[in-house]
Amino acid sequence: MATEQKLADARGRVTQQREQDRAGRLAGVGKAKPRRASASPPTPRRARPHALSTAPPEPAPSRHQVALVDHADLRTVFGIKFSRTHLWRLIRAGAFPAPVALGRTSGRPGSRKCWRFADVEQWLAELEYVGADDAA
C-alpha cells in the first residue's frame, strides 16, 4: 500500500512539472538562462587551450586535402580518361589510389565511390613521364 502511494505521488509531481513547463512555454518563459553580456565574444571551442595538451594545434587542412572527386571529376579536372573497369583493375593492382565509399551503404557494392583530391594529385606527380624521345 505504501508503494502504491509513493508511485501515485511521483506521478502527480511529474504531471505537475509538465503542466508548469507547458504553461511557461506558452507564456514565452523558457528554462534557458539568459546569456550574460561580455566584453569579448566567446572563444570557439576549437581555439581554447586544452589543459593536458602541450603540442601545438595542427593546422586546418586545406580545401584540396579534404576535397573528393568522383569518376566524372577525374575526367574533367585531371584529364584521366580511364573507364571504370580499367580504374578498378589499377586499384586492385595497387597502381591507383583506393577510393573512399560514401553514404549509408559505404562498403557495400553499389555505394558511391570518390577519391581524395590530394591522393590523385600525388599519384599524378609520381607518374613517370614518357616523352616522344623516350618512346622509341
Image: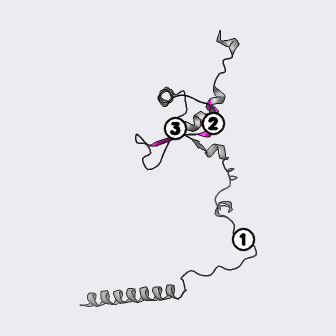
Query: Which quadrant would residue 96 be assigned to in this image?
Result: top right
Q: Nearer the viewer, residue 119 or 73?
A: 73
Using residue 3 as the reference point, say whether residue 126 is left or right of it.
right
Q: Mark 1: which secondary structure?
A: loop
Return the x and y of residue 34 as percentages of the image width and height: 62, 81
Q: What stretch is highlighted in magenta?
A: 102-123
Q: Nearer the viewer, residue 68 or 44?
A: 68
Q: Callout 3: few (<14), some (14-19), or many (20+) C-alpha neighbours within 10 Å?
A: some
**Which circle's residue, 2 or 3, is located before the other in the chain?**
2
Q: Which residue is drawn at 69% across and 66% down?
A: 43
Relative to residue 131, is residue 4 depicted above or below?
Answer: below
Q: Which residue is drawn at 66% across and 47% down?
A: 63
Q: Which residue is drawn at 46% across and 89% down?
A: 20
User: Which quadrant is the C terminus positioned in?
Assistant: top right
Query: Which quadrant would residue 13 be assigned to in this image?
Result: bottom left
Q: How is the image coloured?
A: one colour
Which amino acid lies under the numbered mark 3 shown in the image of this protein?
Pro
Residue found farthest to the right: 39
Which mark is on residue 77? Answer: 2
Calculate the distance from the C-alpha at mark 3 to the C-alpha at mark 1. Answer: 41 Å
Residues marked 3 and 1 touching at CB (< 8 Å): no
